[in-house]
Image (spheres, helix red, strand yellow):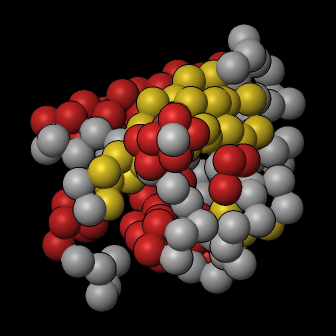
Amino acid sequence: MEGWDPSTKSTLTRIPLLTTKAGPRDGDAWKQRLKEEYKSLIAYTQMNKSNDNDWFRISASNPEGTRWSGKCWYVHNLLKYEFDLQFDIPVTYPATAPELELPEIDGKTQKMYRGGKICLTVHFKPLWAKNCPRFGIAHALCLGLAPWLAAEIPILVDSGMIKHKDDTASASES
């Protein structure tokens, strides 16, 4: 955590670490891991809300907990930009981090792979590998998606690649 800003350190230390090393193929151990994932996500969400920093909603899309979807948003120049968020839990999880997808902005930045998967290879993947199996979905959002949104969304907005929903609505009314 050397070189991290105090806010990131503080946030990260308050997200519960996970203990169960299990993936979707591991039966009851996976169910235990899912319980830990939910506890960690709930703690992270509550922390964000108490700090007036609420920026995502996410839940499992299937009973097995292998497909997740929701919304994330980023405020730039006092305007809220909202995006669909989805990902699958890899069969090799937790050794392999989930690939977070923002399908609406697929192809609008070079820091994204086909299908809207955000690029996390250089900065986040080594961190994930070092902290496996203690990191979970909440950690991927905190240390992967949040910094990616902070770095990319302002550039995409300022370059005109992303328009605010009010701008698109008023343009279609004209």
Q: Residue furthest front?
A: 174
The vertical placement of 90 against 158, above or below, is: above
Q: Residue at x 19, y 66 (%)?
A: 7
Examine the image and state in which quarter residue 22 appears.
top right
Going by the image, does 136 lie left or right of 11? right
Q: Residue at x 66, y 30 (%)?
A: 68
Can residue 72 be seen in this snapshot? no
Going by the image, does 15 lie left or right of 97? left
Q: Residue at x 23, y 77 (%)?
A: 5
Q: Position of residue 109 (x, y in %)?
A: 67, 73
Judging depth in this view, the residue of 68 and 108 nearest the camera is 108
Judging depth in this view, the residue of 134 and 44 nearest the camera is 44
The vertical placement of 62 against 19, above or below, is: above
Q: Position of residue 93 (x, y in %)?
A: 74, 46
Q: Position of residue 13 (x, y in %)?
A: 27, 56
Examine the image and state in which quarter residue 86 appears.
top right
Q: Residue furthest top?
A: 63
Going by the image, does 92 lie left or right of 93? right
Q: Residue at x 74, y 58 (%)?
A: 106
The vertical placement of 22 against 159, above or below, is: above
Can residue 118 be seen in this snapshot? yes
Where, quadrant-wise, is the N terminus in this rendering?
A: bottom left
